[in-house]
Amino acid sequence: MLFGAHVRQSGGLGKAIERGESAGCDVIQVFTQSPRQWRPTSRDVDELAALAARRRSSSCLRDWVCHATYLINLGSTDEAVCARSAACLTENLRVASALDAASLIVHVGSHLGAGLEPRLPAIADAIGAALEAVPAGSDLLLENTAGAGGTIGRTFEELALVIDAAGGSERLGVCLDSQHLWAAGIDFSTPAQMDAVIDGLNAAVGLSRLRCLHLNDSKVPLGAHRDRHANLGEGWIGEDGLASFLGHPAVQRLPAVLEMEGYGGDGADKADLDAARLIHAAGLELYA
């Protein structure tokens, strides 16, 4: 298993790589542009290629993944927002692919009460257009959600509907976030419960589509339907529950990315990664 963290990008992506190396990351996650602005970050092809080469030359970073801007809402009932989201998704996938990132992770968005089924054609069109515009490169991973409001992806069945509607490309996959899973009311804190989670995921979308983990504790209790990350061992899931999540045989080949304030309060660092690796070791013993 590869352990890493979402790293700060102040000073540029080159500095983000350095921060990941200093923390002892095997993998890092970065934004392809500002997470809360529509305007893409201006980078030319040569700059992106140089950054990709810099990451490949790292002594410890074996890969990186990208996260799309939070503003994307492919399920919006507002045609202008939907069109802007589709264009933004394509640009984010272009940048991630130019960076030679393993994947681009995206929140599908919210249907805003309209229901998923009526919005599926627009969502599928946006995803299909992005894959067609960027025909080779990063996988596109849909992230499960905490289940607030009309957010799309609170269940594996919803993710499967989106993937199928978008044509089922092999480049489409899933990023499984532990905190979102917990907040959506899906308990995985014992091996038997985690077995059930994996079985459900396999039945809905197939384990071959599970390609990344977001490893976060939760500031809110089971089923609270709120996206609130906590440092490892400091939330409602706890170290034992996270060990059950991390130790399952089906997830051992995956990158596990921390997204939290960190014990030092400035993002996950070496101490947080050390804690993750210890939790992982305890998890492996649960399934031995």
Image: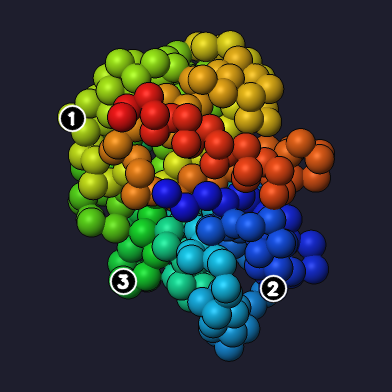
Residue at 55% over, 18% down = 237
Instruction: State the residue in front, 93 or 115.
Output: 93
Residue 187: x percent and y percent? Answer: 42, 15
- Secondary element under disc 2, as helix, strand or loop, is helix
Furthest residue toward bottom: 46
Label 2 CA crowd tier, 10 Å (few <14, some 14–19, many 20+): some
Whichever of labels 3 and 2 marks the residue nearer the N terminus, that label is: 2
Q: Earlier in the sequence, mark 1 or mark 2?
A: 2
Please name the residue that numbered disc 2 is placed on.
14
10 Å neighbourhood of mark 3: few (<14), some, or many (≥20)? few
- Residue type at mark 2: give it: Gly
Q: How far across and down, in percent of the image, does residue 259 sit?
A: 62, 41
Q: Nearest to the eye among marks 3 and 2: give it.
A: 2
**Residue of label 3:** 135
Q: Is residue 286 above or below residue 96?
A: above
Residue at point 58% right, 11% down? 221
Q: Amino acid at mark 1?
A: Ala
Q: Position of residue 248 (x, y in %)?
A: 34, 32
Per the image, the residue denoted by label 1 is: 203
- Given this view, does label 3 or label 1 mark the residue nearer the observer? 1
Q: Residue furthest left?
A: 203
Q: Residues within 10 Å of mark 1 (few under 14, many from 20)?
A: few
The Cα–Cα distance between marks 3 and 1, rounded to whole angstroms, is: 28 Å
